Amino acid sequence: MKLKKFRIKNYKSIKDSDWCWLASDVTTLAGKNESGKSGILEALRDFDTDIATVPDEAMPLDDNSEPVIEMCFEVEKTILDEIAQEINITINKEARDYISKNGVILTKYHDGSYDLDDEIDTFLNKQRDESNTKHIGEIKGIVERLSKIEQLAGVAKPKMDGDITTIQQAVNQYIEQLKPQVVSLPEEEVKQKVNEDISELTSENNILDKETVANKFLEELKKYTPNFIFFSDFLDILPFELPLAEAKKHKTVQDFAKVSNLDLDKVIATTDSQRRRNILSEHSATISGDFMDYWGQNQLDLVAEPDGENLRLGIKESGKTLLFKPEQRSKGFQWFLSFYLRLNAERDETNIILIDEPGLYLHAKAQKDVLKVFEEISKESQIIFSTHSPYLIDAQRLDRIRLILKDDKDGTKIENKIHKGADTETLTPIITAVGLDISHDFSIAGKNNVLLEGISDYFFVQALRQYIKINDANFIPCVGAQKIPQLVSLLIGWNLDFLAILDNDTEGKKIAKILEEKLSVEQNSVIFISEQDGFSVEDLFTHDDFNNFVLDEIKNGETTTLNSKFLKDKALDKVLLAKKFSEKVREDKSKIKLSQDTINAFKKVFDKITVGFKKT
C-alpha cells in the first residue's frame, strides 16, 4: 500500500493542515524553523498501528479538540483479493472501482481507534443494508397488521430508528408485551393468526444483520498499512569495541550487520579466529564499497575485525594503516554513517520513512550525498523529510516540495503549490536551490538557463523531457510572466546565458516587449511557446491527450476549446494537474502514450531552445 496523501487536524500547532499530496518517492517538507515541520512528521508517526493511542502531548494547547490523522492509501487489487479471502467477505464491484480510483482513507483518533471513509463503508455494507431494509419493511408491515386488532391496539409500536441492535431490542420488547394480550383474544382463528404473525415477526427480527462488512474489512486492512519509521536524529554511532555477545543488542551494530548481510550468530558461533576474521573482513569490504558510493568526501574504509571475544569496528583512510575509532572522525561523518546504516536497514516496501531535518551536521557538499541515499532508498520505501536547507532540495525535482506555513490565526498549514502563500524566509531554500539567490553566485543555475512563466509550465516541460532528450537546459519556474524581467536582469548582471519561454497571449507579448525595449534582450532569447495566437503550454497537448492524461474527472467535451481556456473556465487547479501528470510520467512513461502531434509540438519548443543557446 502506497500513501497518496494525508491530512492532520488538532495536533500541536496544526489546526488543519489541509490535504498534502505526496510525491511517489521522496516528499520534501520545506519551511522555516518553528513552522511545524516536526509536528507533521510526529503525527504521521503516531498513525502507525503499533502506537496504541495518540500521545497526550499532541493535544493542542488552545482548545479542547482532539487530534485526527487521515491517510489516503493506494490499495492494490491483490491486497483486496487477499482481504476478501482471509475474512470471507465479498468486496463488490462498486467498492473496488471506488478504491481503484480514489484510494482508501483511514482516519485515526486520539483514543487509537480507526475509521473507514463513509463512501467505502456504504459500498461494502450495501448488500447487508439492502437486506436489513427489506426485513425492517416486513417487520413494519406485521406491526401494522397487529396494531389493527382492537385488543392489541394499546401495545406501543416499536421505534424502528437507530442501529440494528436498538431496533432488535425494541421489537423484542414489543413481542413480550404482545404475548400476554394474545391469551385474551376471543376468537381462536384470530389468536392463531396473531401467533403466526408473532412467530414471523420474531424470525424477521432475528434475521437482521448487526455485523458490518466494513468493520471486518477495516480490521484486516490495518494489517497491510505501512510501518511509519521516524528519525529525529542519528546519534547512535558505531562503537569501537564491544563484546561479541552484546553485539546483537546494539542497534547500530545490528544495522551494520543487516546492511552488510553479516550473520552475527555465525560470527559468534565460529571459534576459529582465522575464519572469524575472514567472515568479518568480507562483510567490511561489502559495506565499505557501497557506503563510499554515497559518501562523496574523503575515501575511507570501514573495518570489522575480531579481538578475542570482542568485535572491533573502526575506520581507515584509504591506503593508510592507522585505525580510527568512529568517534574520532568528524561529527558529520559519524552522523552520515549512522544515517546510512539506519535507513538501509529499514528500507522495505512496507515502511514509510520519516526524517526530521537530516544533515544538520553536514556541510553543503555532504548534504547533497544525503539526497543520493534518499534516491536509492526510495526505490523501496517512501520517504518524507523536513528541511530548511537549500542543499537538500533537488532543483530538478520541485514536484517533491511541499511548503510548511504557519500563522497565529490558522496554525500550521501544508501548501502543495511551492509559490503560494509563502514568505521570503520560507521560499529562501527553494529559491537558492533553483539558482536564484545571488548570495550563492547562482551556483546551481547552469550555463543554459530557461525561464518559464510558472510552476505548471515547469512540471509539463520536465515531464516531456522524458520523451524528448534535452540535457543542456536548466529550467527555472517563475511566479507568473511578470516576474521574468526581474530574473532576466539578475542573469544579465551575473553574465549567465538564458532564454525566456512565454505564452503567446496578451501577457506574454507584453513581457516580450519589456524584455526587448527595457532590458535590450535579443529576439532570439525570447521564445513563444507556440506560433498559434493565444496558446499556452497546456495547448501543446492535443485535445485527446489532455483529456486522457492530464485532466481528472472533468473532461473537455468541446474540441474547439483550448485546453488552457477550459482550465480557466472550470477554475481547475492547473498546478496540481501538471504535477500529477509529471509524476505519472516519472513513475512509468510507457503508460502515457502521447500522440506524435503532442510530442512534435513540445519538440519544436525544445529545438528552439537548442538553437537559441547556439546563437547566444
Image (cartoon, rainbow, N blue to C red):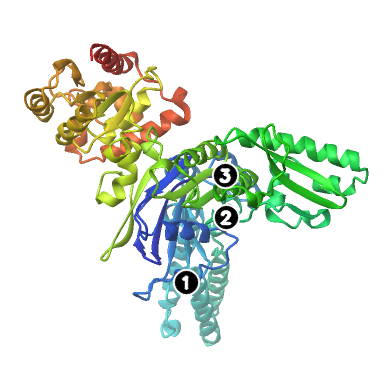
Looking at the image, residue 404 sits to the left or right of residue 264; the answer is: left
Work out whether 332 lies above or below 211. Answer: above
- Looking at the rendered image, the disc whose residue lies closer to the viewer, 2 or 1, is 1
Q: Quadrant of the N terminus?
A: top right
**Location of mark 1 (residue):** 57
Q: Nearer the viewer, residue 90 or 325?
A: 325
- Identify the residue shown where x is 45% and y is 73%: 143
- Which corner quadrant of the image does residue 210 belong to? bottom right
Residue 284 falls left or right of residue 510: right
Q: Is residue 53 visible?
A: yes
Q: Amino acid at mark 3?
A: Leu
Residue at x 27% of width, y 66% of height: 408
* Nearer-N-terminus badge (2/3): 3
Q: CA distance from mark 1 to mark 3?
A: 36 Å
Which residue is tagged 3?
80
Residue 555 position, x and y percent, is 28, 33
Instruction: Tell me which amino acid carries mark 2.
Output: Lys
Is residue 134 in view from this perspective?
no
Helix, strand or loop under label 1: helix
Mark 2: give few (<14), some (14-19) or many (20+) Cα within 10 Å.
few
Marks 2 and 3 sit apart, C-alpha to C-alpha, by 12 Å
Question: Which of the numbered marks, if any, corresponds to residue 222?
Answer: 2
First in sequence: mark 1 or mark 3? Answer: 1
Q: Which image quarter: residue 10?
A: bottom left
Judged from the image, the secondary structure of the residue bearing numbered disc 2 is helix
On the rendered image, what quadrant is the C terminus found in? top left
Q: Establish if 245 lies above or below 94.
A: below
- Do the residues under discs 2 and 1 have CB atoms within 8 angstroms? no
Q: Position of residue 533 (x, y in %)?
A: 12, 20
- Mark in front: 2 vs 3: 2
Q: Amino acid at mark 1?
A: Glu
Question: Most extreme residue toward the left, as rendered?
Answer: 517
